[in-house]
């Protein structure tokens, strides 16, 4: 049974759908609001009135069934994608879309859409959902899928938990051996933003045979470094550089395997050191871990590539930041990229609110997004995802400045027919 625990808020830990039903109905009787999380991080929000309780689905983490004939897997919503993928791997199958962190859950990822470096090939995680079970705000169990109650299905997917608590899902799988599928990286590096955006657009619209693709850009404010002798600071120039990586299947050799092992050990060591490096003194180490993401290994397995960012990113992204993701139609992709960059760089120059401005981008060929675009009068649109992460200085944005930034982003989306990606961050 679902039992509350006293933490920062009342926490419920259901083990099955019946527990979720009881929790929702009890919350309605007490006029409480539920916030739903898939694991330890917040994955979804469930809009009942006035937050007083947290429903964690981390005990609803079972793989319920693997159908080898249909190549599908049925899971509880709290199951981690990395665990699901490992179970599928024993049968020569795998999930085509997984997040870049091992703790992402199936229900949490479905509730925000779910993108990855393979989205140019397989679309969103929501495109892999065959059907789902949910509990609505009245505590009623429902089911929907691609072929039944499709309107409700699309309303729940990507709704960040506002339309109901997802309790179980059936997912598509593909035939793949991620441990023994080897990839080689075709990397291009840039010091000029215009060239980077042009190259990213070219490969988003024409990905060729790339198994994975990703572009990253980093743009820092002028760096102030304490003088080694005396007082005061030395101001260095800005750092601006980017990399586009396309990863293609390759045949492993003994030399490639050795390079992969050495690279894996180096990345794990750097991530462990960065995780332990706190405060200002640890900033260079954390920056080095973040920079490691810009230089993808020359050779690695598909499994390594999917979780390349896991250690370095989590250890190097300490501190407050403003994040936003935008799905831009390819017809306006470059315009959206430039306008977002100019928006954040302009605020940094005028107010000093940001230090490092970084962007990540890749293509998204998604039936779910195409349907959304068609409903908004943009037929047949393919998309590129553009995400910006802006490090804050000071520790929080003033409310009026935040409103100005949000208003600017909304105007870009309206005029360019783009859509915000509600990633739950």
Image (cartoon, rainbow, N blue to C red):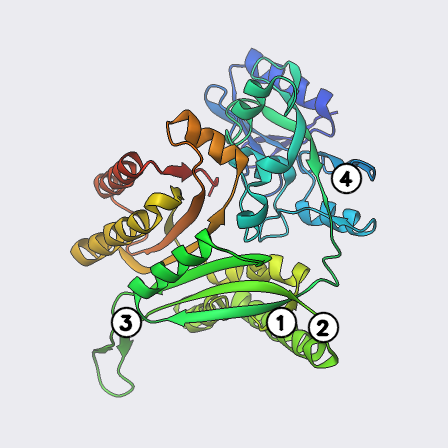
The earlier-in-sequence mark between 4 and 3 is 4
Place of residue 333 in the rendered image (x, y in percent of width and height, measured from the top left): 35, 48
Q: Identify the element where label 2 is drawn.
A: loop
Residue at numbered disc 3 = 223
Residue 252 bears which disc, if any? 2
The earlier-in-sequence mark between 2 and 1 is 2
| Circle 1 or circle 3, nearest the eye | 1
Q: CA distance from mark 4 to mark 3?
A: 52 Å
Residue at numbered disc 4 = 71
Residue farthest to the bottom, as pictured: 229
The earlier-in-sequence mark between 1 and 3 is 3
The earlier-in-sequence mark between 4 and 1 is 4
- Along the viewing direction, whichever of 224 and 340 lies nearer the viewer: 340
| Residue pictured at 70% horizontal, 38% vertical | 172
Residue at numbered disc 1 = 299
| Residue pictured at 41% horizontal, 57% vertical | 202
């Amino acid at each position: 049974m679902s039992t509350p625990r006293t933490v920062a808020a009342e926490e419920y830990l259901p083990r099955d759908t019946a527990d979720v039903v009881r929790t929702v109905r009890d919350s309605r009787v007490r006029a409480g609001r539920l916030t739903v999380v898939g694991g330890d991080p917040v994955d979804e929000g469930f809009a009942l009135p006035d937050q007083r309780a947290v429903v964690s689905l981390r005990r609803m983490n079972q793989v319920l069934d693997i159908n080898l004939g249909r190549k599908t897997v049925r899971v509880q919503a709290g199951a981690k994608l990395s665990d699901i993928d490992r179970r599928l791997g024993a049968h020569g199958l795998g999930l085509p879309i997984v997040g870049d962190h091992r703790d992402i859950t199936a229900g949490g990822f479905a509730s925000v859409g779910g993108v990855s470096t393979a989205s140019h090939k397989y679309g969103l995680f929501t495109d892999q959902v065959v059907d789902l079970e949910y509990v609505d705000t009245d505590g009623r169990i429902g089911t929907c899928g691609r072929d039944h109650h499709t309107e409700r299905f699309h309303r729940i997917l990507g709704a960040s938990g506002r339309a109901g608590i997802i309790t179980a899902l059936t997912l598509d799988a593909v035939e793949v051996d991620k441990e023994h599928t080897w990839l080689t990286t075709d990397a291009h590096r840039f010091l000029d933003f215009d060239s980077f955006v042009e190259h990213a657009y070219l490969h988003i619209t024409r990905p060729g045979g790339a198994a994975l693709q990703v572009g990253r850009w980093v743009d820092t404010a002028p760096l102030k470094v304490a003088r080694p002798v005396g007082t005061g600071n030395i101001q260095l120039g800005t750092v601006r550089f980017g990399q586009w990586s396309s990863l293609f299947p390759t045949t492993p050799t003994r030399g490639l395997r050795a390079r992969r092992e050495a690279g894996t050990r180096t990345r794990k060591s750097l991530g462990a050191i960065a995780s332990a490096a706190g405060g200002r003194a640890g900033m260079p180490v954390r920056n080095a871990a973040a920079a490691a993401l810009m230089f993808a290994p020359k050779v690695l397995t598909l499994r390594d590539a999917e979780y390349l960012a896991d250690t370095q990113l989590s250890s190097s992204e300490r501190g407050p930041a403003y994040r936003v993701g935008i799905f831009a139609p390819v017809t306006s992709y470059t315009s959206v990229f430039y306008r977002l960059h100019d928006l954040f760089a302009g605020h940094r120059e005028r107010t000093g609110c940001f230090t490092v401005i970084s962007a990540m981008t890749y293509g998204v060929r998604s039936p779910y997004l195409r349907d959304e675009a068609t409903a908004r009068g943009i037929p047949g649109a393919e998309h590129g995802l553009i995400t910006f992460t802006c490090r804050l200085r000071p520790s929080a944005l003033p409310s009026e400045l935040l409103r100005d930034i949000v208003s600017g982003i909304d105007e870009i989306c309206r005029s360019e027919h783009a859509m915000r990606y509600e990633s739950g961050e």
